[in-house]
Image: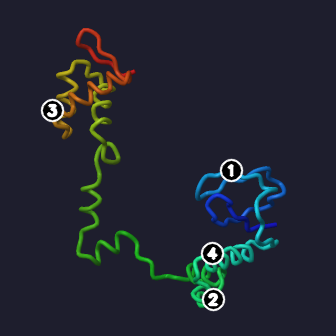
């Protein structure tokens, strides 16, 4: 059984499957938790497609878009159209059609970490790599594009937050 229910806090509608088997449900829009036995039920059906259609109609009516909803066709029809659509272009084809070399794009985006690293992550990496002195940590970070003063500030910040410790000029990540 599928039921269209409404949130009393934000007014959105959503589908619940077997609401009588659940004690509570959380609104995906505002995060309010509701007891399912107290939720207002707008429509019930054994078919999910019928319940989705009823929800779509409620949303259209709420936004004064009933005419547009009726022109659009059923939810099932729209889903079939999306599945049948074969005009999608993948990233590689899009880049090629735009005159951009996709291999060059892939090479430009590739690095040894599998993605770009934040300045703080680079300072943490320096500590993990065994760089214990401020000079070694800052050197490691600057070699990877972190400005010298930013590296020092980040090291100080990690120490103040208790995520790293310093003793006799030696730093260690906690």
> Which circle's residue, 1 or 3, is located before the other in the chain?
1
Q: Nearer the viewer, mark 2 or mark 3?
A: 2
Q: CA distance from mark 1 to mark 2?
A: 33 Å
Rendered image quadrant of residue 36? bottom right
Q: CA distance from mark 4 to mark 3?
A: 55 Å
Residue beneath the point at 76% across and 52% down: 35
Q: Can you say which quadrant of the picture contains the C terminus? A: top left
Q: Which residue is mark 4?
A: 59
Q: Nearer the viewer, mark 4 or mark 2?
A: 4
Q: Which residue is mark 3?
A: 148
Q: Nearer the viewer, mark 4 or mark 3?
A: 4
Where residue 5 appears, as percent x and y from the top left, is 73, 65
Q: CA distance from mark 1 to mark 3?
A: 49 Å
Q: Nearer the viewer, mark 1 or mark 2?
A: 1
Image marks 1 and 3: residues in contact by CB distance under 8 Å: no
Q: Nearer the viewer, mark 1 or mark 3?
A: 1
Residue beneath the point at 26% across and 14% down: 170
Rendered image quadrant of residue 54? bottom right
Q: Which residue is mark 2?
A: 70
Relative height, residue 39 to residue 113 (above, below): below
Report whether 112 appears left or right of 74: left
Relative height, residue 148 to residue 48 (above, below): above
> Which circle's residue, 1 or 2, is located before the other in the chain?
1
Q: CA distance from mark 2 to mark 3?
A: 62 Å
């Amino acid at each position: 059984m599928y039921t269209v229910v409404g949130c009393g806090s934000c007014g959105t509608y959503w589908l619940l499957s077997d609401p009588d088997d659940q004690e509570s449900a959380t609104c995906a829009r505002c995060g309010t938790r509701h007891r399912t036995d107290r939720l207002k039920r707008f429509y019930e059906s054994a078919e999910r497609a019928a319940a989705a259609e009823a929800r779509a109609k409620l949303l259209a009516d709420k936004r004064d878009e009933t005419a547009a909803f009726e022109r659009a066709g059923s939810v099932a029809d729209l889903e079939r159209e999306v599945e049948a659509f074969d005009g999608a272009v993948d990233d590689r084809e899009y880049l090629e059609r735009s005159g951009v070399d996709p291999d060059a794009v892939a090479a430009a985006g590739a690095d040894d970490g599998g993605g770009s690293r934040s300045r703080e992550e680079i300072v943490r990496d320096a500590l993990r790599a065994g760089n214990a002195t401020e000079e070694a940590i800052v050197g490691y970070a600057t070699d990877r594009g972190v400005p010298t003063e930013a590296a020092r500030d980040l090291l100080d910040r990690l120490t103040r937050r208790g995520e790293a410790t310093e003793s006799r000029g030696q730093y260690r990540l906690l």
